[in-house]
Image (cartoon, rainbow, N blue to C red):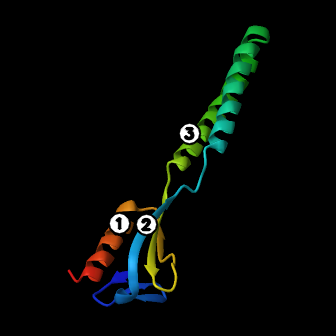
């Protein structure tokens, strides 16, 4: 993506600076918490099964369920990390329509582009 005094160029599209009314940034979350909660519940159930197996069957059953709890616990951690991700979309608004010009997970990059477009719009 490049920004100069007259145009904003994104891949094959170009937007004239004098035709852009406003530029906004939208933030979306690509992953929700439901998977994290479900996998966490499975991990907790495995921990409870390990305690129950240790009391009734001995160490072998407890070790099996502890390994399962560790695997599901790792997956819970990975799913939780995904819920922290954000997608940022740069949206130039023209008189005719609104278009998604550029998307990234890098917040600084998107806001830097928005600042450069606004600076070109004001002539700075």
Q: Is residue 66 above or below residue 77?
A: above
Q: Residue furthest left?
A: 124
Residue at which label 3 appears: 77
- Percent x, y for residue 111? 35, 66
Is residue 121 toward the left or the right of residue 14 in the image? left
Q: Residue at x 52, y 45 (%)?
A: 81
Is residue 95 toward the left or the right of residue 38 in the image? left
Q: Nearer the viewer, residue 40 or 6?
A: 6
Mark before the other along the chain sequence, 2 or 3:
2
- Percent x, y for residue 80? 55, 42
Q: Residue furthest top?
A: 55
| Quadrant (top left/top right/bottom left/bottom right) for the N terminus | bottom left
Residue at which label 2 appears: 25
Helix, strand or loop under label 2: strand
Q: Check whether the beta carbons of the residues at disc 2 and disc 1 lie within 8 A of each other.
A: yes
Q: Nearer the viewer, residue 43 or 99?
A: 99
Q: Residue at x 61, y 34 (%)?
A: 73
Is residue 75 toward the left or the right of residue 2 in the image? right
Residue at which label 1 appears: 111
Mark before the other along the chain sequence, 1 or 3:
3
Is residue 60 toward the left or the right of residue 17 in the image? right
């Amino acid at each position: 993506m490049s920004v100069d005094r007259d145009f904003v160029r994104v891949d094959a599209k170009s937007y004239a600076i004098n035709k852009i009314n406003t530029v906004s940034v939208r933030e979306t979350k690509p992953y929700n918490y439901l998977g994290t909660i479900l996998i966490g519940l499975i991990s907790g159930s495995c921990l409870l099964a390990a305690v129950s197996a240790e009391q009734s069957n001995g160490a072998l059953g407890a070790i099996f369920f502890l390994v399962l709890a560790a695997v599901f616990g790792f997956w819970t951690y990975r799913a939780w990390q995904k819920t922290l991700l954000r997608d940022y979309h740069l949206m130039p608004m023209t008189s005719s329509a609104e278009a998604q010009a550029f998307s990234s997970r890098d917040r600084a990059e998107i806001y830097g582009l928005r600042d450069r477009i606004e600076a070109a719009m004001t002539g700075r």
